[in-house]
Image (cartoon, rainbow, N blue to C red):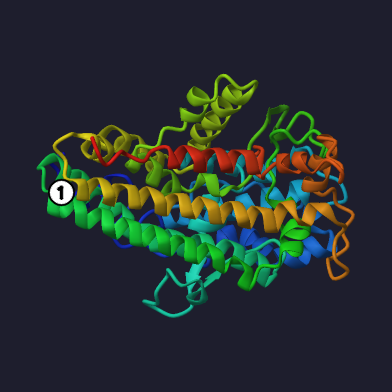
Amino acid sequence: MKERPQDFLQRYGTTASNGFLPDIAPLHRLPDPYYGPWELLISDLPKLMKSGQIRCRIESLSVLETTRLKSEPEWQRAYSILGFLTHAYIWGGEQPCEKVPPQLTCPFLKVSDHFGLPPVATYAALNLWNFAARQPKSDMSNPDNLRSLHTFTGSKDEEWFYLISVSIEAKGSLFIWEMLRCIYAVESDDTETVLSCLQTITAGAIELGILLQRMHEHCDPQRFYHEIRPLLAGSKGMAAAGLPRGVFYDQGNGKGLWRQYSGGSNAQSSLIQLLDVFLGVDHHSTGEHDSNKAGDGQRAIKANAFILEMRKYMPRAHRDFLSQIEQLSNVRDYALRPTTLVGIRKAYNKAVTAVVGVRDIHIRIVSRYITMPSRSPPASYIMKRKVVNLATAATKDQKIEKDREPEREHLQGTGGTDLIPFLKRTRDETRETFVRLDN
């Protein structure tokens, strides 16, 4: 790798200061008045959702062209707006709607193509391009310093759910720079720098876990499970929720396609996958080691396919960055060399341990926010909506009963995979990346 790290980052739409968050802060409004109808809807979205008017208001729109979008922040805002409105249209009624009208389909397909993204509310739409700092130059790794530009429900719970992810991305921005430094240092056998980078990455990963544990401060599990989570769902594997064929994206004039997409998921975070790529985590490992157990090998292959599938839900530049780092990543091979200092191996293992810790915390949060709420009716303070609850429908579809607790683990995530088994498998595969100290 001969080019400067900062040039390498810029080529893939990342920076040392912001990581995968945009270098220019997300716009609060599209500057061209032409897009005023979109802005009016998104500003009133929580009210329109509560009143049940969102679909008729979207249907009354004209089909707007994307030719007036000029800068990258404008394209990002358009993608975020259309992602929110599309999910609001699909899930914002008593039953899910299996057709997205041309008013959304036509511009959303063009904006999505600009980023190489699917036309759904991805992690980028909900988090990366949907935040603002409360004060100029404030620390974005502290969620208290941030606010979301838009939510479906207007609740602090939903906003906090997004902001925890944004703050994690901001905190993790240091990883990207340190990983590149580490890769460079391995190439030149600079053990001092390699050790320093691994120590920084370890400390940072521990801080990610601390941030993740702050979820409970303002996001109530009952509100998340019953009010927020159903609105984040995609159209893939949603037969039980009322979308057996997915969703028809109507382009008008008899044109359109049935499409099935995953919903927004933290698995679509480039940062989380980058940690695995850098450390050389092999997500085929469970399948290899457990192939003697009936079904385990096949489930591991499916989980690994899901991880790769989630890259399609990342902005094109970000997934290209991951692919490039995959080719350059050398730290695990370096740690495995017989001539490598034991101190380097220990530092590498500590980094792996820190990432395993983050995955353990994630499992506990999923248990608290999804598994446990699924076991009981909604709390009395939960907004009573007649809309089909994705989580409840998915649970019924898998015939999970209260007296069959082991099967509780197979609740599906908004990304469309079995949550707890998938998370445990990826955690275990990360742990298996440890290197022996006595090579």
Q: Residue furthest bottom?
A: 135
378 is higher (above) or lower (below) than 307: below
Numbered marks: total: 1
Residue at 48 percent of width and 48 percent of height: 269
Q: Is residue 424 left or right of residue 7?
A: right
Circle 1 residues within 10 Å: few <14, some 14–19, many ≥20: few
Residue bearing the label numbered 1: 4
138 is higher (above) or lower (below) than 170: below
Q: Is residue 157 left or right of residue 95?
A: left
Image spot of residue 361 (x, y percent): 55, 56
Image spot of residue 400 (x, y percent): 83, 39
Q: State which quarter of the image contains the N terminus.
A: top left
Q: Looking at the rendering, which quadrant does residue 298 occupy? A: top right
- Give the camera-side residue of 125 and 333: 333
Q: Looking at the rendering, which quadrant does residue 25 occupy? A: bottom left
Q: Is residue 260 left or right of residue 381?
A: left
The amino acid beneath tag 1 is Arg
Residue at 33 percent of width and 47 percent of height: 349
Image spot of residue 180 (x, y percent): 24, 48
Res 437 seen here: yes
- Give the camera-side residue of 343 and 438: 438
Quick one: SS at disc 1? Answer: loop
Residue at 46 percent of width and 29 percent of height: 285
Res 130 seen here: no
Q: Looking at the rendering, which quadrant does residue 386 occupy? A: bottom right
Image spot of residue 111 (x, y percent): 52, 44
Q: State which quarter of the image contains the C terminus.
A: top left
Q: Residue furthest front?
A: 438
Residue at 60 percent of width and 26 percent of height: 296
